[in-house]
Amino acid sequence: EAGVVQSPRYKIIEKKQPVAFWCNPISGHNTLYWYLQNLGQGPELLIRYENEEAVDDSQLPKDRFSAERLKGVDSTLKIQPAELGDSAVYLCASSSRSYNEQFFGPGTRLTVL
Amino acid sequence: AQSVSQHNHHVILSEAASLELGCNYSYGGTVNLFWYVQYPGQHLQLLLKYFSGDPLVKGIKGFEAEFIKSKFSFNLRKPSVQWSDTAEYFCAVNPLRGGGSQGNLIFGKGTKLSVKP
């Protein structure tokens, strides 16, 4: 069974540029999460989807971040415009439903210059 | 707000030494508890989980953890570590009711374990 797939694995951009990350969850997993992980910290939730509905986006900085999960399968997280402080690893995870164990993708390491 | 504390930032051990990593959380209700591990260059993987029942849970690779409800703790243990256990370990809590975070994992900052051969 394939795991959670994320792309790209690495991204380097200049500040004020837009950037997008893509995630394909494990087949059949209805719940999808995007996390932000700064160096030396644990992952912090940005947004949680149940199928195509964003059920918790309280930690998503909506002035520059947006996300979508059309058709309730894969998802895209976008930053526009990127700032220096956005440099971090962006993780995607999925689970069969909330409260169950989550399976994580390899993450996208973003560097903003 | 709910939080998870991991007391040790970096632990260095020799092979065959015993390991205990501390984890405490601040939430008075029912929780699901997890330990995740991240080996160098790899993604986060589940090590073990506690949902209910026996508070002593066993995970992969000889790891175990004990849930002590009265202490809000879920410490990770291994009697004899190996060089291959070198990794970063994250404790995570999923509050089941109330507080606005139910369904979400709240992670600690992680403990880096280095095992000397």
Image (spheres, coloured by chain):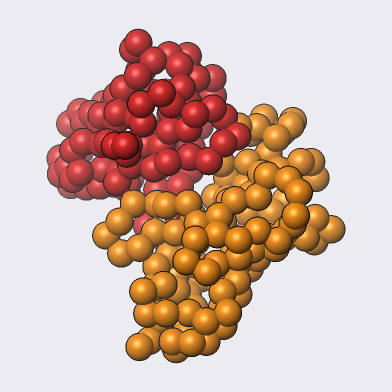
Residue A3: percent from left, percent from top: 32, 39
Q: Is residue B65 above or below residue B33?
A: below
Residue B19: percent from left, percent from top: 56, 78
Residue A64 shows in the view: no
Residue B21: percent from left, percent from top: 59, 70
Q: Left or right: A70 with respect to B29?
A: left
Q: Quadrant of the C terminus of chain B?
A: bottom left
Q: Is residue B76 above or below residue A8?
A: below
Instruction: Give the total number of marks visible in the rendering.
Output: 0
Pick whichever, A87 or B11, lies toward us: B11
Q: Left or right: A71 with respect to A49?
A: left
Q: Is residue A9 above or below residue B66?
A: above
Residue A74: percent from left, percent from top: 31, 22
Chain A visual colour: red
Q: Residue furthest right?
A: B70
Residue at 36 percent of width and 26 percent of height? A27
Pick whichever, A58 or B17, lies toward us: B17
Chain B visual colour: orange
Pick whichever, A63 or A46, lies toward us: A46
Q: Is residue B49 above or below residue A86?
A: below
Residue at 45 percent of width and 16 percent of height? A51
Residue A2 shows in the view: yes
Q: Residue furthest top?
A: A71
